[in-house]
Amino acid sequence: MLKQKRLIRIETSLTPKQAVMLWLREEHQGKVSDEYARWLIQRPASAAPRPRVGKQVADAIRAAMKGQEPARINQAVRQGQMYADFLVLLVNRTKWAILNDSQVRWLKIALFLRTASQRRSL
């Protein structure tokens, strides 16, 4: 039980960047894109990366700023959530661009090979 409390305390003190890195390490470790997509679909919407990381960041900021002015806390929470959301989107878009580029590259190679073989047969 002590270990679980310690993990909760550590997770509620993460910066937005650290929270996104933890999400990447936990959820993507050893999974290919198709496996991760199937796994994510089976989970509730609240377990999706953007809301989950956003909540984790908000909790960390509230814990760190406990006792300060509520307006200041809310502003910091919003900024932290926006930064974490940006990082999650950046990771997802980068992965998509890499996968899409590799698919396009294979299509270009296949088209080139087909065109080359057609020219040889003429």
Image (tube, rainbow, N blue to C red):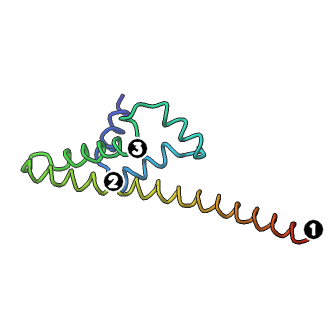
Most distant residue in the front direction: 122
Q: Nearer the viewer, mark 2 or mark 1?
A: 1
Residue at image x 57%, y 46%?
A: 33
Q: Is residue 44 left or right of residue 77?
A: right
Q: Is the residue under label 1 in contact with that under label 3 (CB below 8 Å)?
A: no
Residue at image x 74%, y 65%?
A: 109
- The spot of residue 23 in percent (x, y) is 43, 46
Which amino acid lies under the numbered mark 2 shown in the image of this protein?
A: Ala
Q: Is the residue under label 3 in contact with that under label 2 (CB below 8 Å)?
A: no
Residue at image x 41%, y 31%?
A: 44
Distance between mark 2 and mark 1 Cα atoms? 56 Å
**Disc 1 marks which residue?**
121
Most distant residue in the top direction: 1
Q: Nearer the viewer, residue 109 or 73?
A: 109
Lower position in the chain sequence, tag 3 or tag 1: 3
Which amino acid lies under the numbered mark 1 shown in the image of this protein?
A: Ser
- The spot of residue 17 in percent (x, y) is 36, 56
**Disc 2 marks which residue?**
84
How packed mark 3 is, by other alpha carbons closer than 10 Å (few <14, some 14-19, many 20 or more), is some
Q: Is residue 41 left or right of residue 64?
A: right
